[in-house]
Each structure stands twice: as structure tokens, then as C-alpha cells.
Amino acid sequence: MGCHMPVSLAMMLGACVKPFDAWRRRPGPGFGRPPTAEMDSGEQRRVTVLERCLGSLAAVRPAPPPQQEKVEASNFSERLQLNYCPTKRSEVLRSLRPQEEPAFAAARGEGEAAVEIHWTPAFGRYLVAARDIAAGEVVFREAPLVVGPKAGAGPTCLACLKALPEDTWEGCEQCGAPLCRPQCGGRGHGERECELLALLGLKHEPRNTSRVKQLNALLAPLRVLLLMERSPAAKAIVDALQSHVEERRGLPIGRFVETHVVAVLRERLRLAFAAEEIRRACGVCDTNSYQVSAGEDRVGRALFAAASLMNHSCTANTQHWYHDDVMSVRAVVDIPEGAPVTYAYTNVLWGTRARATHLATAKLFTCGCERCLDPTELGSHISSVKCRECPQGLLLPPAAASAPWQCRACGASVSAIAIETLVRAGGAALGRLQPEDARSVAAAHAHLTRILGDTHYVVVEVKRALVRAIMATPLADITQADLERVLDLTSELLRLADRLQPGLTKIRGLLLLERSRALVELLWRCNTGAEGDAATHLETLICNIPGCATLLQNLTEDLAKCEAILLYDSRFSGVKEVKQRLETLKLTIKTSLLSKEMGKIDFTDMKTGDSPRHVSIGGN
């Protein structure tokens, strides 16, 4: 359950927040079998459909279809019928170890199902581990039911999801909808969809940005409805998914759906679906979609059946990657048998109230996990604000939203309104960042640290932005001071990840990658003529054989971890580049060390048969 779409922090800080202590706290289910409870016949039917769907998934990535079959979206409908039809013999849901080749790996053994569906009256349906799952295993792989642009996104190719320029994109020759080129090879924009979108009149309003955003908001529900229309198996699965239709009816999202989706699909596109069916399709998309990325400039949202059954946790035990039109759900920590298989529906590097606002408004529930109930957030103090009355004190958030914040060091208190104003101002500054300008990001970091303190989540976001901004510059153009700053920031953020996102998580992989890139560049400069204190320090280290060996060994281990974490990530090639550079650097350093050691030997005093002592720094 739960839509898993990222929202900007600046947007969340500007949202209207309900009193925190008035929200219903919803703890996640515990380990083990759920207590015996009676499901009504409708719920039992939905669980049965989803169990069949779950059983039909294989951990091995499906082979790509032949090129000649890659033309119509209806091919997916046929594949869905084949894979999910109740008459098909179910295969077990298998796991794949990360060292195995994902395209060709064999199953780990018949009967070793990785997950199963549990149900309780309190939590509904959710996935649990059917056996012990090791960190790094792919729990399951799943193709999406539908894929489409993000709701509210700008011009996006409807066929391949490529982001398009605001004013120069091409329109489909038949309907005028955005395409990256008239003959885009993507499968998203089918013939039936094209016929319907022609009724919107986009051909007569070329490159109208507001109309395009309206189109993106209704496209995913439209694709769900068209899939249901042509595939009874798909309809059974969609009908089994949660929609929160009743809860959404009186909310702003419900009113938006009524005006911009239901009315348009029924009146402009003349679809025969009942209004309630359209509302339900919208709810299913919003509740069960994940953001997917097919590269840096190809981002959208996709609807998944099995993945929708993962419950939320602020310290989730899985993450997902999307590659070659398949989602891989992977364990980031060991998951014992009987434990819920969880995913974070929100950004876990936000503070508790920002996360809770997002969950309450977008997912219609409130988390009550250990972290959410701890004012220090597992000792990270990511919501705490700097105290202005004492040098080291932090103002901690109270349980009640309207209560004053109090410093544990000196006892000073500040009103909730003052803190909220301060945090909103920080969020606004974050929204104004120029992410490619490292100098302006560094200035914002210094300013916000003075206001909010070094641990606050707004400052954490700026630290991450600063690392990205510095490392986006060509390595040769980055100053030594900035490279050293990256080492400090990434080390600090990795310590935070240990508390809030432990395990083989994406943030750990990306931080290790940037730290390794910066350190390898510094070592290169030392070897080729660096300047200043950094050069002196590095030269001392290079000349210290045990210290150099340890440094290179740590670098090698960091890159091995990074490689394992980012195995399915689009930035995996960057890890390979750093590894190759490190291997070359090792050889260069060894040669330099051998030369210096040889220079210390007085060959004139050596007896015949003696040889220079061997120098080893580890590695090759």
C-alpha cells in the first residue's frame, strides 16, 4: 500500500501541518504469523488474486521480447494474461544473490519462496519474509502494470518518459501529445490512447505547458482503465489493490480528481467507465505507484501489484531499482523469517514532522515507529534546532505540536510558532538553491547551519547538495580544499546513514562513490605535484608504507561495497571508472615507493648474491 513518490522538501515545509499529537499513530506489524482473524469474502477474494500474482513472479529478469514484438502496448496485455492468469501454474517467488548474473541466474531451488502475504484487521495485507533473506538479495522482480509521466511533471515523452524542453518538443502527429521524436521507439503511447488523446485538441495548442501538466495528471489512470478494458486478468489485479477512495473523497486530492480527471475522461474523452471506477483508478495509481527512472532524464511513475503490498517503515529493510522495465526489490539488511518486508514511502532523511505531513496527506496514515516516537530520532537529532542561549545545546521537538521546544542543555524554551517559522524559512532557502553552483550552495550551508544547527535535516539536504555540486565539476578543476571538504561531508553523512538508513542503501553507495572519487583524485595530485598542506600530508602518507597500504586497502573495500550496492543503478559505470583509476594509481605508488627504497640502498657495500629488500604495500 502507499504511493511512493518523492516530494520536494521545500514543498513539504510549506504544507499546512495538522497537530502532530492529533494524528492516528500506526505502528508497523510485528514479526511472526498474524493472529487468527476473519476476512470478509471480498477481502479474501482480493488476497487470493494477489497471491496468484505474487506466485507468478520470478526473481530472474524476463528476457527482452523480440524486436518485432516491441511495437504495441497490447503485447503487455497478452504477457500479463500469460503470467497472471489463474489457470497458469504458479512459480515460487525466488531470490537472487547479488553476485549472480541477473539475466541468466538459475533459481535458488524450488519451494524457496522469499515472501508471502499476511493479513490482519489492523494492518490489512502486507508482505513478510517466508524464509531468512540475506542483505543484498533481490527479494523479487516485477514488471509494472502501467508506466506514465509523473503527475504534475512538465513536458514528458509519453512513449519513453524522456524529459522534454518546455518550448521545443515535438507533438505526436496524430494526437499532438508530447513525444521526443515522431517515431520514438518507446512502447508507452499506444494506438487506442492516441485516438482518445486526439479528442483533447493538443494539436491545436502546441507546447501548451499547463495543458501538458493536466495531461500528465490523468494519463496513469487512463492507462490503468485501458489495461483493465482489454485484460480481465489485469482488471482482477487492479480491483484487488487499495485505493482509499472513501478517505480521499472530501480531501483536496478528491476534488482535484473530480475536476481534472473524472470530468475530462467522461466528457472530453467520452470514456464509458463509471465515475466511481475512474475515481478508484486514480486512487489505485496514487496509492500504489512508485517513482521509476530509466536514466537521469527519464523519470516517471509506475504501478506495481506485488510491490504495493510492502508496508511502510522509516527504517525500511528494502530498496528498489528500476532497470530494463523491471523493478528489482532488494534487501538492504538481513530480514529474518516472519519479519515484515518494508519500504519507505517517504524521504527518511527528513525530520519526523515533515515525514508525518507527507504520509498523512499523501498516504492517509501516520507512522508510529520507534524513530517517529523518539524526539532525538535515534540519536541523529535531525529535527533538533540549534539553541541560541548556549553553545552546544539543541532544542528538541515536543510530542505536542503546539508545545514549546526546550533545550536539554540549558533549559531555554522557544515557542512552536517561532520554530515553525524558522524551519519554513530554511525550507524556502533550500528551494532557492542553485544546485550546480557550488559556491552559492556553500554559502547557503554556512547560513543555514548558523540558524538551524549542523544536524537539522534542512542542513543535511544542503550538505548532500554541496557534495553533488562540487563533484559535478570536472575533477581537474576542483580545488584541493573542496576535495577535502567532500571527504569531510561524505564521512559525516555516512555516519548519519548508519543511524537512519543502515545497510546496503543507495545513499551509502553514492556517498562512498563520491568519497572515493575525491580521495583518488587527491592521491593522483600528490603523485603528480600537489601544493600546500594537503600535499605535505599526502606525501607523508605515501612515504609511510603501512599507512599507504591501509589507505589503499580501505579505498578498495569502499569501492567493493559501492559496486555491490549500485549494481542495478544507472551510476554503476562511475564505480568502474574509479576502480580502474585506483588500480593505475596503485601501480604508480608502488613504483614510486620502490624507487625511494632503492635510493636508500648503498649498492657499493652489497656482497654478491644480496638483493634489495622487497617492498609491498598490499593489493596487486
Image (spheres, rainbow, N blue to C red):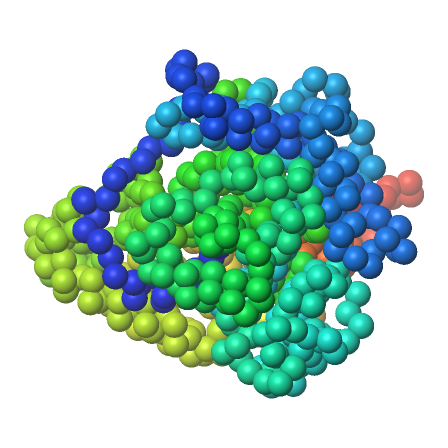
At 45% across and 44% down in the image, what residue appears? 243
At 59% across and 38% down in the image, what residue appears? 237
Report the side of 289 relative to 426 (left or right).
right
Estimate the x, y position of residue 50 in percent, counting from the top left.
Answer: 58, 31
Q: How many marks?
A: 0
Q: Is residue 547 above or below residue 37?
A: below
Residue 161, visible in the rendered structure: yes
Q: Nearer the viewer, residue 128 or 581?
A: 128
Query: Image quarter for residue 177?
Result: bottom right
Estimate the x, y position of residue 382 in percent, counting from the top left.
Answer: 32, 52
Query: Image quarter for residue 36?
Result: top left
Estimate the x, y position of residue 282 in percent, counting from the top left.
Answer: 49, 53
Outermost top residue: 36
Q: Nearer the viewer, residue 561 or 111?
A: 111
At 51% across and 59% down in the image, what residue appears? 487
Report the side of 601 relative to 300 (left or right).
right
Q: Nearer the viewer, residue 315 or 368?
A: 368
Quadrant of the rendering where the C terminus is positioned: top right
Estimate the x, y position of residue 440 in percent, counting from the top left.
Answer: 42, 79
Q: Is residue 35 above or below residue 30?
A: above
Report the side of 590 relative to 376 (left or right).
right
At 30% across and 66% down in the image, what residue appears? 14
Residue 127, visible in the rendered structure: no
Q: Is residue 463 above or below residue 178?
A: above
Report the side of 449 relative to 50 (left or right).
left
